[in-house]
Image: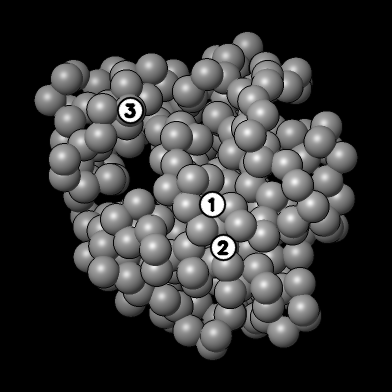
């Protein structure tokens, strides 16, 4: 595993790369978290046979805050940052996995990278412009997801909503460290309809897509996701694991097995 900061137009971003000759899999974390959330993938079975690349989004973890928040802290801006990471690493064929905010960033990348071989989305309902109410459940924690400043109780409550109990210390640190301007700007951009229509993006995509969610996710409307027409939905269904919003952590063994199978099918052209 190697770690280094990569200079992009959105700031210097911390990137970790397991290396090797396996299929590249880019993992994108969620709002106010960091690449550490994928520890059970990097240290688990998923790393066998795959080249895993994790990074901290601008304004998160060990990456720099954005010099131009208005441009960087949108789905399009974050997708551009992720695309630059791939370009600098010289990867023209890749599978992209995104959790929560990272899933929406990954969907935004569909039209930006010709070499996307597959997509894995977790906790990220592809909503129409102005359609957040369709894809998400009413929750006071969604308000925290868009606030610049969070109190200590709000940090704890937000952590529990997105990751479950107990809130891992690294996640609490990540929420506190994250640039609150990113949370604020992301929700401003969503309200004004910036970015692609995510439902249309996936329904028109020819890329194989695996959808893996927690059956007890307190934030997203799982029934809505089942109404989305994915032309190349892996296994012909959306998978639900025994977990909340972060199945890759609380059901890591089953999750890693599913993603490994998806990666194998993508590479064999059977997805």
Secondary structure category for the residue under label 3: helix
Q: Which residue is located at x 26 percent, y 58 percent?
A: 244
The answer to whether residue 245 is above or below residue 206 is: above
For residue 145, side relative to residue 35 (left or right): left
Looking at the image, is 149 positioned above or below residue 236? above
Is the residue 166 above or below the residue 61 in the image? below
**Where, quadrant-wise, is the C terminus in this rendering?**
bottom right
Mark 1 or 2, nearer chain start: 1
Residue pictured at 54% horizontal, 52% vertical: 98
Secondary structure, mark 1, is strand
Query: Which quadrant of the structure image shows residue 135?
Result: bottom left
- Cα separation, mark 3 vs mark 1, equals 19 Å
Tell me if mark 2 has few (under 14), some (14-19) or many (20+) residues whose alpha carbon lies within 10 angstroms of its own.
many
> What residue does disc 3 label?
170
**Element type where label 2 sits in the image:** strand
Residue marked by disc 1: 98
Front residue of 155 and 92:
92
Which residue is found at the position 77% from the left and 34% from the top? 84
Residue 120's label in the rendered image is 2
Number of the front mark, 3 or 2: 3
Q: Residue at x 81, y 36 (%)?
A: 89
Measure the C-alpha gap from mark 3 to mark 2: 24 Å
Image coordinates of residue 179 in percent, x first then y, are 44, 19
Residue 146 is marked as none
Task: Give how far apart the Cα atoms at labels 1 and 2 are.
Answer: 6 Å
Instruction: From this view, report whether residue 115 is shown above or below residue 68.
Output: below
């Amino acid at each position: 595993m190697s770690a280094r900061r990569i200079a992009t137009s959105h700031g210097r971003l911390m990137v970790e790369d397991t290396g090797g000759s396996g299929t590249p899999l880019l993992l994108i974390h969620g709002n106010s978290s960091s690449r550490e959330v994928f520890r059970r993938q990097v240290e688990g079975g998923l790393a066998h046979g795959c080249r895993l690349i994790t990074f901290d989004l601008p304004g998160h973890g060990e990456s720099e805050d954005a010099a131009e928040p208005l441009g960087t802290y949108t789905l399009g801006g974050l997708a551009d940052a992720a695309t630059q990471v791939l370009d600098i690493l010289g990867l023209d064929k890749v599978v992209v996995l995104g959790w929560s905010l990272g899933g929406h960033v990954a969907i935004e990348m569909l039209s930006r990278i010709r070499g996307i071989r597959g997509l894995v989305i977790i906790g990220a309902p592809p909503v129409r412009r102005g359609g957040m109410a369709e894809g998400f459940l009413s929750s006071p924690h969604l308000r925290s997801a868009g606030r610049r400043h969070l109190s200590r109780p709000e940090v704890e409550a937000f952590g529990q909503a997105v990751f479950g109990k107990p809130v891992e210390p690294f996640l609490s640190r990540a929420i506190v460290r994250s640039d609150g301007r990113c949370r604020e700007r992301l929700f401003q951009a969503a309200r004004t309809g910036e970015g692609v229509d995510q439902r249309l993006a996936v329904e028109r995509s020819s890329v194989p897509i695996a959808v893996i969610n927690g059956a007890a996710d307190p934030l997203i409307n799982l029934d809505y996701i089942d109404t989305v027409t994915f032309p190349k939905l892996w296994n012909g269904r959306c998978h639900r694991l025994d977990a909340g919003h972060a199945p890759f952590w609380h059901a890591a063994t089953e999750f890693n097995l599913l993603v490994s199978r998806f990666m194998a099918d993508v590479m064999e052209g059977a997805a």
